[in-house]
Image: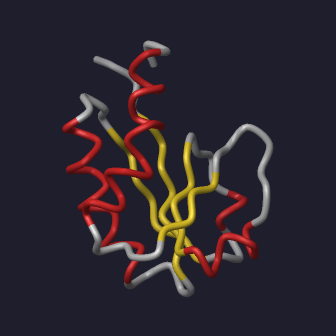
Amino acid sequence: MAKRMKIVTVCGCGLGSSLLAAGTIEKIAREFGVHTSIEAADAGTAKGHEADLIVTQEHLASRIGKIPGIPVVGVKSFVDEQELRNLLGPYFKKFVQEGR
């Protein structure tokens, strides 16, 4: 079985919109042939998670900051499937190309 891409979705409290985003992100990842393991977190604890990718709302990206080796992607809307596909697609393609 292929390795799962570890993704952390981040919102203000780690409960609402980040959980909502997880389902949409998982669906999009499957379109690219990527299996995922997605956890929801709040902005204060996001750095403590092991991840291949962190997806958050734009206004929270600066609170998370830069994490060596882990891309942090800020999105305008967790419910805009096309925006998520456009922003995350390159990361899913790279994950597949690297044979992970």
State the count of labels: 0
At 40% from the left edge and 53% from the top edge, which residue is drawn? 38
At 33% from the left edge and 68% from the top edge, which residue is drawn? 21
33 versus 2 height, above or below: below
46 versus 38 height, above or below: below
At 51% from the left edge and 57% from the top edge, which residue is drawn? 8
Q: Quadrant of residue 20?
A: bottom left
Left or right of 62? Residue 21 is left
56 versus 55 height, above or below: below
Q: Quadrant of the N terminus?
A: top left
Q: Quadrant of the C terminus?
A: top left
Colour scheme of the rendered structure: secondary structure
Q: Nearer the viewer, residue 83 or 73?
A: 83
Residue 54 rendering spot, x and y as whole percentages: 56, 55
Left or right of 51? Residue 2 is left
Q: Nearer the viewer, residue 84 or 12?
A: 84
Residue 18 rendering spot, x and y as whole percentages: 42, 73
Q: Nearer the viewer, residue 91 or 38?
A: 91
Residue 71 rendering spot, x and y as whole percentages: 64, 46
At 39% from the left edge and 76% from the top edge, which residue is drawn? 77
Residue 70 rendering spot, x and y as whole percentages: 67, 44
